[in-house]
């Protein structure tokens, strides 16, 4: 979740909300999928909801300092665990520029090494669509790193 929301503290909140929601909705689990798939879907939805709430809050405020803090909150430089490596910083920035579907697909494939079939169950999207999202995400990340980072 940290790769989706941007910081360990926010990821902790998302994970806590995930388990609270899973506990309260346990009677709604139908057994159509593995429990891990069900939990992962709840976690991804919680992370995306968190990002939407944060974005909505930062868009509704007129305080420039609050807007600046909200904008930097999800950046890699705001994370005290970030080691400052230039490539990791560029990758994180590039991921943040992706549309939501491509960002989530890339994170699940790249960081979690998840199979498309499992991602399809979690996200409710076709494997072909996920492969296309991943391909487009990789291309956009390459372009970003080459243009902003000046790497060859």
Image (spheres, rainbow, N blue to C red):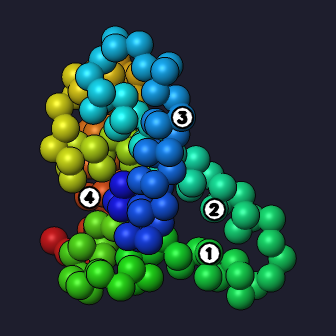
Q: Is residue 76 visible?
A: yes
Name which quarter of the figure residue 83 lies in. bottom left
Point out the tag, 4 or 2, that comes first from the N-terminus.
Answer: 2
For residue 15, above or below residue 65: above
Kindly report the distance in space between the C-alpha atoms of the residues bearing marks 3 and 4.
42 Å
Residue on which disc 4 sits? 142
Q: Nearer the viewer, residue 35 or 137?
A: 35
Helix, strand or loop at mark 1: helix
Residue on which disc 2 sits? 54
The residue positioned 26% from the left and 39% from the top of the image is: 135
Kindly report the distance in space between the C-alpha atoms of the residues bearing marks 3 and 2.
24 Å
Residue on which disc 1 sits? 70
Point out the tag, 3 or 1, that comes first from the N-terminus.
Answer: 3
Name which quarter of the figure residue 63 lies in. bottom right
Helix, strand or loop at mark 4: helix
Residue 24, label in figure: 3
- The 10 Å Cα crowd at callout 3, few under 14, some 14 to 19, many 20 or more, is few
- Check whether the beta carbons of the residues at disc 1 and disc 2 lie within 8 A of each other: yes
Point out the tag, 1 or 2, that comes first from the N-terminus.
Answer: 2
Name which quarter of the figure residue 37 lies in. top left
Point out the tag, 3 or 4, that comes first from the N-terminus.
Answer: 3
Residue 84 in picture, x, y percent from top left: 26, 86
The residue positioned 34% from the left and 11% from the top of the image is: 32
Kindly report the distance in space between the C-alpha atoms of the residues bearing marks 3 and 1.
30 Å
- The 10 Å Cα crowd at callout 4, few under 14, some 14 to 19, many 20 or more, is some
Please tell me whether mark 4 or mark 1 is closer to you in this view: 1
């Amino acid at each position: 979740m940290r790769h989706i929301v941007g910081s360990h503290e926010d990821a902790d909140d998302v994970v806590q909300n995930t388990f609270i929601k899973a506990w309260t909705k346990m009677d709604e689990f139908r057994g159509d999928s593995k429990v891990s798939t069900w939990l992962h879907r709840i976690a991804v939805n919680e992370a995306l909801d968190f990002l939407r709430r944060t974005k909505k809050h930062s868009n509704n405020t007129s305080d420039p300092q609050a807007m600046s803090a909200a904008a930097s909150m999800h950046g890699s430089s705001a994370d005290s665990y970030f080691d400052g490596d230039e490539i990791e910083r560029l990758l994180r920035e590039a991921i943040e520029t992706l549309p939501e579907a491509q960002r989530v697909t890339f994170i699940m494939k790249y960081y979690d090494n998840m199979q498309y079939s499992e991602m399809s169950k979690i996200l409710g999207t076709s494997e072909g669509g996920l492969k296309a999202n991943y391909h487009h995400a990789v291309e956009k990340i390459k372009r970003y790193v080459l243009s902003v980072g000046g790497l060859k």
